[in-house]
């Protein structure tokens, strides 16, 4: 989340940013935060003076004792001080809670070049790759094709785990693994370091990576434990370096991971009743970059371009869009999505997101770098390399044949023991 010093230094920019997001009503929060911070600081000054007075009185009592002189009046004064300090500390604690309650719900400042808009309809497509295939009325939905070719068992997933969980079998499971391996190899060649992270984080750590409302809407809680299942590898990757300070010369730090991801997906769209596109559990290759302020937005362009190259290798039609101010999430300062073309659905749909969160996460996780004599909070960036389930749906819809087979993109064939296609109807 943001912090008081940031608000003081960027007051007008933040007000303007809230207006661009369509959240003008939150502008008054900035004044509330600053006013309560002023009270907190005034109380701290008084409490510090009282502590100093307590120490002086204590020293005076020792001196009088050593001289065998009366010190009853001074002792009485000294005994009244701790209670006054406690009252001030309680008031300071309450003010801190109030300040944090606003900070937790305050969205990040927008980058100056984020396009204006109210919602996803105002997002701006600016790159296209490959012609969209012509409409084919014979196309099967991916779920229907997978069931007919015994490459997935949706009913068993629903019965054994619930809606939004599936079994991938045989060659489809191989395709999932092939996408994972290709994604990791792709990143390792680009200088990323592979990490195997924990799949569960405690609330304090996770709270440094996601807005508070996601705990209810997205995150799975482990009953009886202070642990939550990760919704994306971004969460353990960015928290890997909590409370760490880097030298500017050591940045950027580039790390990646492959993990299962767990999401409630509560909302208007929910999860797929049958299918792979929107599930409670899926596999994803994620990239995270830790940057200084100066280079972070150039690195965002690099990360987005990297994922473009990956999806070009998969031979899928796609477009790149820039997310507008009204559709941008609360932690993002700027974001690009790649949307693949899904011919059965006759629409582009998101398969990756690349975003810069600025200081929003690093301030809470206390990740800094040293530049000269100054310490600054790092900028943290994240990008989906590939969410395998959505990539597989795109492959199935774009490359299915009338005989029920699915063509495998050339880049994946070496990870599938040379197979050029999978599936097929039984004769």
Image: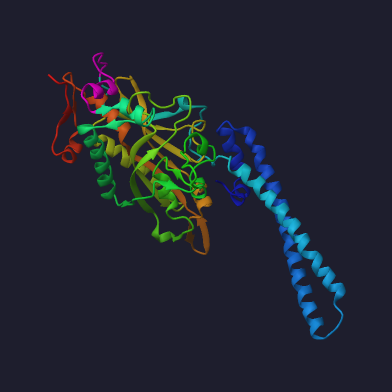
The magenta region covers 134-151
Q: Residue furthest top?
A: 137
Quarter of the image holding residue 53? bottom right
The x, y position of residue 397, in whole percent, is: 26, 24
- Who is closer to the viewer here, 196 or 330? 196
- The residue under the point 30% across, 19% down is 344
The x, y position of residue 275, in whole percent, is: 33, 25
Predominant SS of the magenta segment: loop
Q: Is residue 421 above or below residue 95?
A: above
Q: Is residue 406 above or below residue 76?
A: above
- The residue under the point 47% across, 46% down is 227
The x, y position of residue 180, in whole percent, is: 27, 41
Q: Is residue 142 magenta?
A: yes
Whether residue 147 appears in this view of the structure is yes
The x, y position of residue 51, in whole percent, is: 73, 66
Q: How many marks?
A: 0
| Colouring mode (rainbow / by chain / secondary structure / one colour) | rainbow
- Who is closer to the viewer here, 266 or 288? 266
Q: Is residue 339 above or below residue 52?
A: above
Quarter of the image holding residue 177? top left
Is 101 left, or right, of 119 in this rendering?
right
Whether residue 304 appears in this view of the structure is no
The quarter of the picture where the C terminus appears is top left
- Who is closer to the viewer here, 136 or 375? 136
Q: Is residue 193 magenta?
A: no
Q: Residue furthest bottom?
A: 67
């Amino acid at each position: 989340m943001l912090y008081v010093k940031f608000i003081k230094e960027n007051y007008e920019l933040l007000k303007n940013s809230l207006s661009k997001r369509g959240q003008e009503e939150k502008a008054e929060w900035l004044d509330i935060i600053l006013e309560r911070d002023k009270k907190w600081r005034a109380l701290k000054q008084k409490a510090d003076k009282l502590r100093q007075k307590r120490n002086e009185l204590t020293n005076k009592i020792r001196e009088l004792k050593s001289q065998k002189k009366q010190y009853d009046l001074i002792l009485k004064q000294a005994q009244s001080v701790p209670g006054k300090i406690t009252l001030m500390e309680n008031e300071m604690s309450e003010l801190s809670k109030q300040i944090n309650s606003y900070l937790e719900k305050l969205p990040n400042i927008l980058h100056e070049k984020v396009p204006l808009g109210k919602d996803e309809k105002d997002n701006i497509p600016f790159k296209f790759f490959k012609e969209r295939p012509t409409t084919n009325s014979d196309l099967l939905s991916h779920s229907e094709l997978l069931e007919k070719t015994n490459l997935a068992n949706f009913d068993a997933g629903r019965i054994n785990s619930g809606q939004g969980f599936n079994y991938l079998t045989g060659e489809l499971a191989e395709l999932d693994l092939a996408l994972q391996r290709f994604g990791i190899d792709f990143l390792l060649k680009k200088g990323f370091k592979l990490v195997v992270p924990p799949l569960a984080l405690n609330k304090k750590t996770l709270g440094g990576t996601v807005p508070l409302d996601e705990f209810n809407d997205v995150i799975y809680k482990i009953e009886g434990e202070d642990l939550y299942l990760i919704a994306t590898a971004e969460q353990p990757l960015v928290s890997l370096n909590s409370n760490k300070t880097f030298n500017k010369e050591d940045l950027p730090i580039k790390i990646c991971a492959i993990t299962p991801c767990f999401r409630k997906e509560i909302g208007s769209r929910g999860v797929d009743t049958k299918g792979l596109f929107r599930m409670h559990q899926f596999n994803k290759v994620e990239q995270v970059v830790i940057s200084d302020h100066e280079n972070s937005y150039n690195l965002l362009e690099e990360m987005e371009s990297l994922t473009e190259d990956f999806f070009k290798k998969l031979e899928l039609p796609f477009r790149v869009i820039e997310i507008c101010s009204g559709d941008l999430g609360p932690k993002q300062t700027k974001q690009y999505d790649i949307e693949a073309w899904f011919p059965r659905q006759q629409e582009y749909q998101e398969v990756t997101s690349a975003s810069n969160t600025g200081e929003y996460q690093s301030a809470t996780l206390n990740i800094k770098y040293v530049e000269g004599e100054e310490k600054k909070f790092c900028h943290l960036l994240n990008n989906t390399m590939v969410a395998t389930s959505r990539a597989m749906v795109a492959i199935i819809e774009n490359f299915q044949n009338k005989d029920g087979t699915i063509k495998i993109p050339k880049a994946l064939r070496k990870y599938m023991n040379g197979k050029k296609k999978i599936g097929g109807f039984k004769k």
